[in-house]
Image: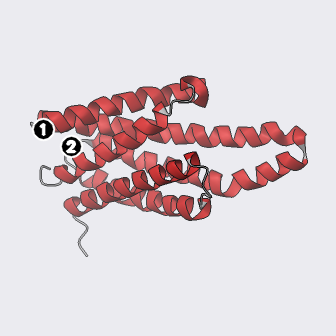
């Protein structure tokens, strides 16, 4: 099978959409206090991000433009694999230790904080990609889609940067960083679907 630039762009966009949907599903289940199948959802995300790193990286070396955007998508995928891996393999054991030995609670909290630091860093990179490809869309004449993507990307970039610098509680109960990051990912994917015939 020939993995042309167009095919790699389409697969990358599709994986971004699927990843955004899985994150939205997990968040909805968590808010509803439903029994969240973490292993299934996070395991699927880990696979998606692993494959995404490969296809976005392939598009990066094939692309004639938007190299910053492609490198941001590739790096974000790698960071997301780390974040998902920490959640799947370390949250449970550290929580059990903290329950058995209260003095170990700060260590468990540190693992969670590290995971969210990586999560926000990955969202910063996806937001950067949304800004890059959104501006590219605007320059190509798609001002509505491009402007919206770049604007949401900027909000996600700033809010996730603030989460990294100030902690997850910087916005109180408002899920600005995560919500804008997911929306920026969706819009980024839509931009990429239209990009394949323009390069």
| Distance CA(mark 2)–CA(mark 1) | 17 Å
> Is 128 left or right of 98, judged from the image as shown?
left
Extreme left residue here? Answer: 141
Q: Quadrant of residue 15?
A: bottom left
> Is 73 left or right of 121, judged from the image as shown?
left
Location of residue 99 with respect to 147 vertically, above or below: below
**Residue that label 2 marks:** 65
Q: Secondary structure at mark 1?
A: loop
User: Can residue 58 be seen here?
Assistant: no
> Is 95 left or right of 116, judged from the image as shown?
right
User: Can residue 159 be seen here?
Assistant: yes
Location of residue 78 with respect to 169 vertically, above or below: below
Location of residue 43 with respect to 64 vertically, above or below: below
Dot 1: within a 10 Å radius of its alpha carbon, few (fewer than 14), some, or many (20 or more) residues? some
Residue at (56%, 30%) from the top-left corner? Answer: 173
Residue at (40%, 32%) from the top-left corner? Answer: 156
Q: Position of residue 25 (x, y in %)?
A: 47, 54
Residue at (71%, 53%) from the top-left corner? Answer: 90
Along the line of sight, which residue is nearer the eye, 66 or 28? 28
Of circles 2 and 1, the one toward us is 1
Q: Position of residue 38 (x, y in %)?
A: 60, 59
Q: Quadrant of residue 134?
A: top left
CB within 8 Å, label 2 to label 1: no
Viewport quadrant of the N terminus: bottom left
Q: Secondary structure at mark 2?
A: loop
Along the line of sight, which residue is nearer the eye, 87 or 169? 169
Q: Which mark is residue 128?
A: none
**Residue that label 1 marks:** 142
Dot 2: within a 10 Å radius of its alpha carbon, few (fewer than 14), some, or many (20 or more) residues? few
């Amino acid at each position: 099978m020939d993995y042309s630039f167009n095919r790699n762009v389409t697969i990358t966009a599709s994986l971004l959409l699927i990843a955004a949907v899985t994150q939205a599903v997990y968040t909805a289940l968590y808010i509803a206090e439903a029994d969240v199948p973490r292993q299934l959802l996070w395991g699927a995300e880990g696979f998606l991000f692993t494959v995404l790193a490969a296809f976005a990286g392939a598009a990066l070396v094939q692309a004639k433009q938007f190299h910053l955007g492609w490198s941001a998508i590739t790096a974000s995928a790698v960071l997301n694999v780390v974040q998902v891996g920490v959640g799947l393999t370390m949250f449970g054991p550290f929580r059990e230790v903290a329950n058995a030995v209260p003095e170990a609670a700060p260590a468990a909290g540190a693992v969670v904080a590290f995971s969210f630091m990586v999560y926000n860093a990955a969202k910063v990179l996806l937001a950067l990609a949304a800004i890059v490809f959104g501006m590219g869309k605007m320059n190509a004449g798609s001002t509505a889609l491009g402007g919206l993507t770049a604007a949401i990307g900027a909000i996600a970039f700033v809010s996730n940067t603030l989460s990294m610098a100030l902690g997850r509680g910087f916005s109180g109960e408002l899920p600005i960083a995560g919500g804008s990051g997911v929306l920026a990912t969706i819009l980024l994917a839509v931009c990429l679907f239209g990009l394949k015939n323009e390069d």
